Amino acid sequence: MAVSLLRGANYSAAMATSFCPSLPQHYFKPIPIFKFSQSSFSIKVFSSQSSSDEISTRVGFLGLGIMGSPMAQNLLKAGCDVTVWNRTKSKCDPLIDLGAKYKPSPGEVAASCDVTFAMLADPESALAVACGEDGAASGMSPGKGYVDVSTVDGPTSKLINAQIKETGALFLEAPVSGSKKPAEDGQLIFLTAGDKPLYDKVASYLDIMGKSRFYLGDVGNGAAMKLVVNMIMGSMMTSFAEGLLLSEKVGLDPGVVVEVISQGAISAPMFSMKGPSMVQSKYPTAFPLKHQQKDMRLALGLAESVSQSTPIAAAANELYKVAKSHGLSDHDFSAVIEALKVKLKD
């Protein structure tokens, strides 16, 4: 299966026909396409060209939480015609003030837009918003597209795909790697799979909201990739937390531990970013712990479905569950360190 990695676009030649007028210059970066196969490797650079029918493309955005709100805001700032919906209507107000339109149901958003994005908290919410009463599917029709950027399991994504496809519309799963700050900065990584024509149509939107995009083939592959990435991230965080507590226990300065790690082979942005606040027992929410635990659970289910042993992730998941039981669900996932403190006291 071919895998395409595309990074930002040099749209200077296509600005006149962009469906998001007057895009700032930092959105216009070269897009290399890397295609891998068993027998060949090739790189092709191209400039995205928007057809005349894309000039009037109307974009819907469903779900305006920690991630969805800044993503939709970046589309608005780029000049896109955006219509929003959220279960709590007040979360739409800041975007409406920036020029977004509002519809009272996902179905009405989808009916009024050419492409609809959805960023929901979990599989249940993603399924309900897409396929429930007055869901997005009720407003879909041939020529429209639905892009689910939520993190869900493969079976859920395939079910949403089936419902959308029954309307004659196209579907793309596109979960993102990145948290609050990357969402605000337009630096997300999109892990897409599904209808390639829809991927091509929304590529420029993805470039506004993110720094890179992968096309991974059939629906389910994007969901699987996201779960693998978050499983690794969640396991790394628990190991990091153990190290910080151990260093303190033996008389080392955990702040210095963070500095040492930042300069070595195991350096990771996550450690440098989260470490200082963890040392101070502060956990400002960039990625809620409850969502990390949900992703660990889904990743373990994925592993079980293919009989893959994941003992490290399973142990890490238990710590996130302990943290949730101590009221830390809405804190940043780095608060998992508190679960280890609780265990030390037991």
Image: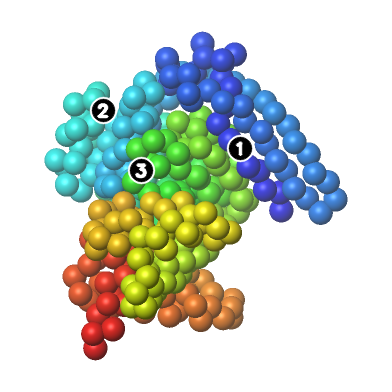
Q: Residue at x 27, y 47 (%)?
A: 65
Q: Residue at x 37, y 29 (%)?
A: 75
Instruction: Please give the label number shown on residue 339.
Output: none
Location of residue 91 in the rendering, given as x and y in whole percent from the top left corner:
19, 41
Q: Secondary structure at mark 3?
A: helix
For disc 1, the marked residue is 6
Of all residues shown, which one is farthest toward the front?
251
Q: Amino acid at mark 2?
A: Ala
Location of residue 230 in the rendering, given as x and y in whole percent from the top left corner:
46, 61
Reading the chain from its start, which is encountered first: label 3 or label 2? 2
Query: In the rendered view, would you say 259 is above or below 52?
Result: below
Q: Amino acid at mark 1?
A: Leu
Reading the chain from its start, which is encountered first: label 1 or label 2? 1
Query: In the rendered view, would you say 1 is above or below 115?
Result: below
Q: Nearer the viewer, residue 203 or 322?
A: 322
Q: Amino acid at mark 3?
A: Lys
Location of residue 244 in the rendering, given as x and y in whole percent from the top left corner:
37, 69
For disc 2, the marked residue is 100
Q: Secondary structure at mark 2?
A: loop
